[in-house]
Image (cartoon, rainbow, N blue to C red):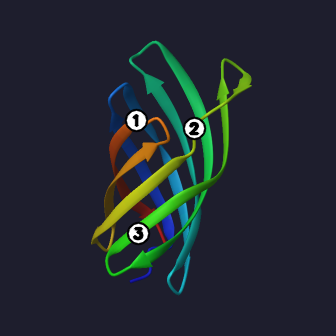
Amino acid sequence: MDISGTYKYTEDFEYGNSEGTVELYQTNKEVSGVFTFTETVKNTYKIEVNEKVKGTISGNKLLLESVEVRAIQDGKAIEYLPNTFEIQHISENKLVGSTFDTEDICGVFVLDKIQK
């Protein structure tokens, strides 16, 4: 299984939702990539996020840890808690998973492959 490619990213979490893209690169069991998305918090504000990740595949599961995060709100850089992504390989073109940060804010997401 090679999950390298570009994915559409949609996530729902307790305070809102996120939409964007994910680029994943796999070499053997090692995976790296970038999540680029807009997080909308209960229709009150938006945060533009760019999050670099690294992790390992084991069977049909993937665990990614954030290694660098940049976030912009209203044109200004802000602090943004790094995420852990637990991902399940569902089919050739679909991954699903959950994410959580250090304050235990959790979300569920779908990654639909749009390009290899």
What residue do we see at 61% from left, 34% from top?
80
What residue do we see at 44% from left, 55% from top?
85
What residue do we see at 35% from left, 41% from top?
107
- Left or right of 1? Residue 101 is right
Q: Nearer the viewer, mark 1 or mark 3?
A: 1
Residue at far top of view: 44
Residues at marks 1 and 2 touching, judged by CB atoms closer than 8 Å: yes
What residue do we see at 47% from left, 53% from top?
84
Give the mark nearest the N terminus, 1 or 3: 3
In the image, what residue type sits under mark 2?
Answer: Leu
- Left or right of 14? Residue 20 is right
* Residue 112, x across and y down, in percent: 36, 58
Circle 2 is placed at which residue position? 81
Give the mark nearest the N terminus, 2 or 3: 3
* Residue 47, x across and y down, in percent: 57, 27
Circle 1 is placed at which residue position? 105
Circle 3 is placed at which residue position? 62
